[in-house]
Image: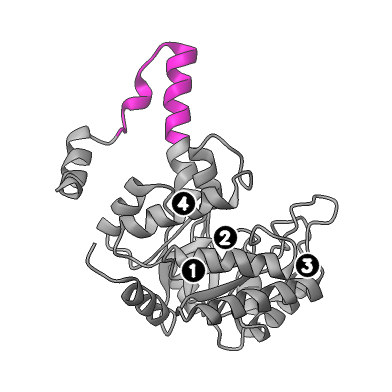
Amino acid sequence: MTRSIAQKRADFRALHAQGCFVIPNPWDTGSARYLEGLGFKALATTSSGFAWSRGHADGALSRDQILDHLRELVAATDLPVNADFENGFAADAQGVAESVRLAVETGVAGLSIEDSTGNAADPLFSIDVAVERMRAARKAIDASGADVLLVGRAENFFAGRPDLDDAIARLKAYANAGADCLYAPGIKTREQIAAVVAAAGGKPVNLLVGAASELTMKDIAELGVRRVSVGGGLARAAWGGFMRAARTLSEEGRFDGFADAAPGTELNAFFRPFAQ
């Protein structure tokens, strides 16, 4: 690796200044390095993809496990890494601040904080509590002296509360509390996307496209979105190929699932330089 943490962070902030870019989501060192090799300019972790790779459901891993994962990916690539930092691994503002301090120390260039509680009966923090948590994250970053980009996430559409007006109110409040980039995962229509971009008041907006979509990157850029992430989409695509091949072998005794497998020679050729 040749770029310093400070350089990665500066590069990441510059990406958010204009245009629209894809920030794909690797789940391990190999996938991160391969995505870098394809020419992407930044990467973001995926809590779901990483959890599945460890044999757990999304949201079941500890803060320490996630911090170790962040260190691994930051060390694996010269690209800036944005952390899917879930809900900050704490309910109160003080706990969020401590978690964010630890995340900044891993070398990430950005991190997101969700307003989800993890409680199915009451899935979202009240907006007042959520804002207090966002302010605590902002203060922790500022106190560190690191130029880490803070992403405010309104989880309405993921938490079973698909209220666009409430999501927009939350995003505006998070922007005022210090979020640099705004994110409402789960919005899909042009109208929803345009409404969020308009409400952002010029702040960068992240759009999640984790499944097949009629929208192209050109369409999304024209709507004013600044960056596009895929969440667990790439991990699920990989798991889809694995599951189809494994089931065909188990249920039919056939090897057809290997037809589209990547050649081992190609993978070895790509990864061999990293051992030097």
Q: Main secondary structure of the magenta part?
A: helix
Q: Position of residue 199 (x, y in %)?
A: 66, 83
Label 2 vs label 3, nearer the camera: 2
Q: Are marks 4 and 1 in contact (CB under 8 Å)?
A: no
> N-terminal of the two: label 4 or label 3?
4
Q: Does residue 6 appear to the left or right of 166 in the view shown?
A: left
User: Image point 18% across, 45% down: which residue?
Assistant: 275
Q: Amino acid at mark 3?
A: Asp
User: Image point 54% across, 77% down: which residue?
Assistant: 141
Residue 189 can be seen, yes or no: no
Viewer-closest of 272 and 3? 3
Q: How many labels were placed on the picture?
A: 4
> N-terminal of the two: label 2 or label 3?
2
Viewer-closest of 227 and 73? 73
Residue 193 can be seen, yes or no: yes
Task: Identify residue for label 2.
Answer: 85
Checking the image for residue 130, the label placed there is none
Q: Are marks 1 and 3 in contact (CB under 8 Å)?
A: no
Task: Identify residue for label 1.
Answer: 104
Asked which secondary structure carries label 1, the reply is helix
Checking the image for residue 163, the label placed there is 3
Q: Does residue 189 appear to the left or right of 236 in the view shown?
A: right
Q: Does residue 145 appear to the left or right of 139 in the view shown?
A: left
Q: Position of residue 20 (x, y in %)?
A: 42, 75
Q: Quadrant of residue 170?
A: bottom right
Label 1 vs label 2, nearer the camera: 1
Marks 2 and 3 sit apart, C-alpha to C-alpha, by 23 Å
Asked which secondary structure carries label 2, the reply is loop
How many residues crowd mark 3 within 10 Å: few (<14), some (14–19), many (20+)? few
